[in-house]
Image (tube, grey):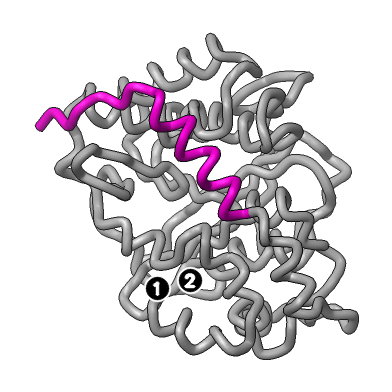
Amino acid sequence: MSGCAETVRFFWHGSQLGPYQLMGMRSFVDLGHFVELFTYDPAIIVPAWIVRRDANEIWPTDHVLTYRNDISRGSFALHANLFRYAMLHRLGGWWIDQDVILLRQELPAQDIFFSLETVDPMRATNSVLKFPAGHPLLSECVARCVAAGETPLYGETATVLFTEMVSKYRIARQGRSIDTTYPLSTLDVPSMFDPARRDQLHARCENATFVHLFNEKWRRAGIPGDLGPPAGSFIDDLLLTHGFETPSARMEIDDVRRWTACLTLHEEVQGGQRGIQRIPSLIM
């Protein structure tokens, strides 16, 4: 195990874990780090290379929050927003979204880590976070999530809230370039399954530390989790790199294009929703 090994923490709720859900966590283990996975459901099978943690240690509940009001209806990502802030407030360290792949061994060496998607106006992301335990930003985020309950639209307690808090607590200077965490965008999801785009996507990831795969977009598009990706695609490479056998039944790229045709429209809808929300100006 490398001397730079760190513990990174994830949350999962819902179906059993398959290759698409596991390869992000496996990428951290393969590069020498320790993975802890918080879950409420004791029936979820967790591989031996993951340390299982009871999510009730962080946020005791008998009801896991889901989005109710928009195109992400039914997604447990709403609860994950609350959980990440509560977990970091209590334990500190690293929070990683389950669909993030680690691309290089060393994690950024700083006490606070997040990425800035844009600077003017500021937009901060919260898929990869590092904070010291007890930071007041985190406790305020928890309180806001609790107050919001299940009323938010997608992103309101994620990037929208986190951006507001980064501005309020004047920590924008600690944000890293979006290219560190998001060398690919949501609109690249179809290309991730296209063998003809594999090399281009790998090249765009060369200087990044992480790559986010946007599994929520997969869910919205109806990309089936029981089928393997097209052979030779970017996703196929990631599965093979981290030791997962691809299901023998594979998707066809034409089907992927059809399933994901609505993603651009979804992004436009979300962009319109964000546009009518007031995001505070950058306060340095």
In the image, residue 280 lies in the stretch drawn in magenta = yes
- Asked if residue 48 is positioned above or below residue 198 in the image, the reply reads above
Residues drawn in magenta: 263-284
- Asked if residue 13 is positioned above or below residue 162 in the image, the reply reads below
In contact (CB < 8 Å): disc 1 and disc 2: yes
Percent x, y of residue 10: 58, 47
In the image, residue 281 lies in the stretch drawn in magenta = yes
- Asked if residue 198 is positioned above or below residue 220 in the image, the reply reads below
In the rendered view, does 182 fall on the left or right side of 177?
A: right
Q: Name the residue under label 2.
A: 32
Mark on residue 52? none
Q: Name the residue under label 1.
A: 105
Percent x, y of residue 176: 25, 53
Nearer to the camera, 192 or 110: 192
**Dot 2: what SS?**
loop
Sequence-wise, the earlier of marks 1 and 2 is 2
Percent x, y of residue 126: 42, 42
Write down the quadrant of residue 47 in the picture. Answer: bottom right
Q: Which residue is drawn at 62% across and 16% down?
A: 151
